[in-house]
Image (cartoon, rainbow, N blue to C red):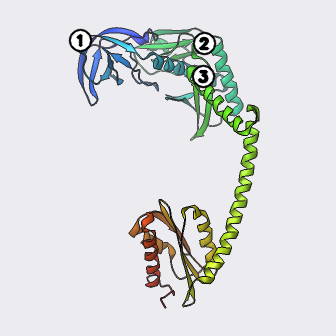
Amino acid sequence: MAITDRLYYADCYLQEFQAHVIRTSPDGRGVRVFLDRTAFYPASGGQPADQGTLAGIAVLDVVEEGEDVAHVLSESPSSEIVQGVIDWRRRFDHMQQHTGQHVLSAAFEKAGGYKTVSFHLGTETSTIDLDSDRVGAKQIEETEELANKIVFENRPMQISFRPSAEANQMDLRKPTFREGDIRVVEIEGFDLSACGGTHVSQTGAIGLISIRKVDTSKGLTRIAFVCGGRALRRARRDFAILSEAARQFSTGLENVPELIAKQALELRDAERLRNKLLEDLAELEALELWRSAPERNGSRLVRRLFAAEDGKKVKMLAHALAKHAPAIALLGVRGKPAGLFLAQSPGGKANLADVLKQTLAKFGGKGGGVHDFAQGGGLREDQLEEALDSAESLLRAGYFAVTLMSS
């Protein structure tokens, strides 16, 4: 069986090529086409597959099958000789990101001894995972400076093929366990890596390397970054967002962080004041509702429906009503979905968690609680009144040994 000659190994800048169709096989998306040679890169090593056309037909995917490369098309080409055209904008973007990863990974290793354990080239950002969760902000900044220094120096890059035994005697950043000839990508005087991906020919073509986000988890540090055209587009977007924020605040760009912090503090103070006012209002309203509720066998039952916008206050109201012994509150909040709040004075005989459980089992929704307080959500608004009827009926029927009874 013929092995696909991978043209991108020697020339990552090749955008068009001719090839012979060797064979085809079925694919759920159409057909897999195998060629004697290809410039299409298959998904591998964290880098997505190329896109483009083959005989004028869109290439849906490019995948490895052993030593062969399969091109997934919606239909078979009509000729045995086909013209392949690479989506160059996508390819060059991937070349910038992948080469930028080589530079950034080497910079982290040289600056702090951190090794890259995985790489993913995403549609918006790319990520590398470092083998430590103790990478400090200063180390990250120094590494970013070093990586961009290598870019600005526009160092040449070389691709060579070496026998595996010889390659592993070289100062590879990461040892390779592949057999046969090994493709080695060299950044002059800075990095040697065994890699089958596509890369630019000089580091200057990477463009700016910009670290966008840092996360730590399970002993690793994930670095999200963008290079080249992506870095330009993100800088443009950042500037537009910052400019709009400055316009909203009627200030200069440099003052936006300070004003945001000030407004956030004022908002927290306002929210605390609002909650205090809501609590005071709930206390007053609870007293009024409790006083007007009918007394039956020494207990008062307060049952009310409230508008959706009162949801936060209703929870406070339920707790406030429970302070007036002896009392039980059955409160519903309209909305899509609707909600229920059940509360009783401490030590009441009803198990409101069970009342809610039985009610939700009948009308749907989720929720839970404890003996004296329970809340649920996800009910249909048109069934809210009926759900309150059901909860009240459970109480009145004595199912939970409540002293509240019909007069």
Badge 2 amino acid: Gly
Q: Give the crowd class for mark 3: few <14, some 14-19, many >=20 residues within 10 Å.
A: some
Q: CA distance from mark 1 to mark 2?
A: 41 Å
> In the rendering, which numbered label is found on residue 79?
1
Name the residue rendered at 32%, 15% in the picture: 56
From what the image shows, is residue 372 above or below residue 130? below
Q: Tell which tag, 3 or 2, sits nearer the viewer.
A: 3
Is residue 232 visible in the rendered structure shown here?
A: yes
Q: CA distance from mark 3 to mark 2?
A: 14 Å
From what the image shows, is residue 312 above or below residue 251? below
**Left or right: 154, with 400 as reference point:** right
Badge 1 amino acid: Ser
Residue at which label 2 appears: 204
Badge 3 amino acid: Leu
Q: Secondary structure at mark 2?
A: helix
Residue at which label 3 appears: 232
Is residue 323 visible in the rendered structure shown here?
A: no
Is 68 in front, or is 207?
207
Q: Residue 211: image x %, image y %?
A: 62, 28
Q: Residue 391: image x %, image y %?
A: 46, 76
Is 326 in front, or is 255?
255
Among the two numbered marks 1 and 2 on one chain, the one whose residue lies closer to the N terminus: 1
